[in-house]
Amino acid sequence: MLATFLCTLLVAGEPAAKLPPPIAKEMTAALVAVNKALGLENWGAEGEKPCVDRGGLEATIKDVSASDTRTCAASALARGFPGLGKDYVLGIPMAEIGPVTVFAVGKSQAEGWGTYSCDPTRKCNPTKLAAPSKQAKRLADRYRRACADARTVWFPDREAACSEGVSQTTADRTTGTATATSAGQEPAPASHP
């Protein structure tokens, strides 16, 4: 077990000490654009009109499919995010009623960094996935769970998000598992007490 853990640390490498500002800015902008488009994180109260119909107040809530979520998010991302798929990927975990949140995870020179949805009044600044903060642990756990859930909508695609191009092992270290994942393998779910 110790050998597996040490191998995992060597394969993952260390995240960059500082995320390049243009990547951080674009990663955050893409996350906010998708949040607005899907009507997540209270953006509707800020006057943003989502491109998915979830129903209204005191009305029957409408479910939003993964296909509708992908179409809507793709329209928001069409405005031009050149680093998407190259420097970072986006994940949109799905519940039975529709999209739940949005998060971004870095790859290539941004590997080991990520950010997730936040309210319109807060900044969604990227953080190191291996940091000891509550936010970093929550993001790493969401990422690990999203890779294990086939319903998650990914941009550009699942292969780019949950393969060796993105440091799944960094998320594993943060959540306390010590298994390296390779392309095509699903990460083992963490045990919860």
Image (cartoon, grey):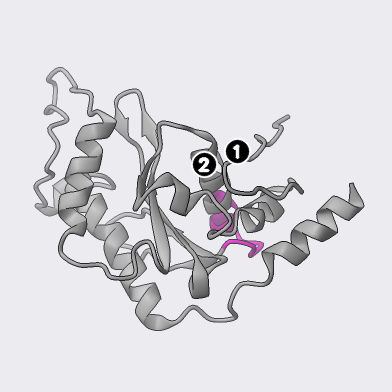
In the image, what residue occupies the spot 40% across and 57% down? 89
Q: Is residue 131 magenta?
A: yes
Lower sequence index among marks 2 and 1: 2
Q: Which residue, given by chain and number where applicable, does mark 1 sit on?
A: 186
In the image, what residue occupies the spot 36% across and 53% down? 117
Type of amino acid under label 2: Cys
- Between disc 2 and disc 1, the foreground one is 1
Q: Is residue 15 rendered to the left or right of residue 113?
A: right
Density class for disc 1 (Cα within 10 Å; few <14, some 14-19, many ≥20) is some
Type of amino acid under label 1: Glu
In the image, what residue occupies the spot 90% across and 52% down? 2
Quarter occupied by residue 94: top left
Q: Is residue 70 rendered to the left or right of residue 174?
A: left
| Vertical position of residue 80 compared to residue 142: above or below | below
Q: Is residue 107 magenta?
A: no
Range covered by the magenta-colored residues: 129-138
Instruction: For mark 2, give the secondary structure.
Output: helix
Circle on res. 88: none
Asked if labels 1 and 2 touch by Cβ distance under 8 angstroms, the answer is: yes
Residue 170: x %, y % from top left: 64, 58
Spatial distance from mark 2 to mark 1, Cα to Cα? 7 Å
Instruction: For mark 1, give the secondary structure.
Output: loop
Q: Is residue 48 visible?
A: yes
Q: Which residue, given by chain and number where applicable, does mark 2 sit on?
A: 147
Q: How many marks?
A: 2
Density class for disc 2 (Cα within 10 Å; few <14, some 14-19, many ≥20) is many
Q: Residue furthest right?
A: 2
Residue 12: x %, y % from top left: 68, 63
Residue 79: x %, y % from top left: 15, 64
In the image, what residue occupies the spot 49% across and 65% down? 107
Residue 85: x %, y % from top left: 38, 61
Q: Is residue 43 visible?
A: no
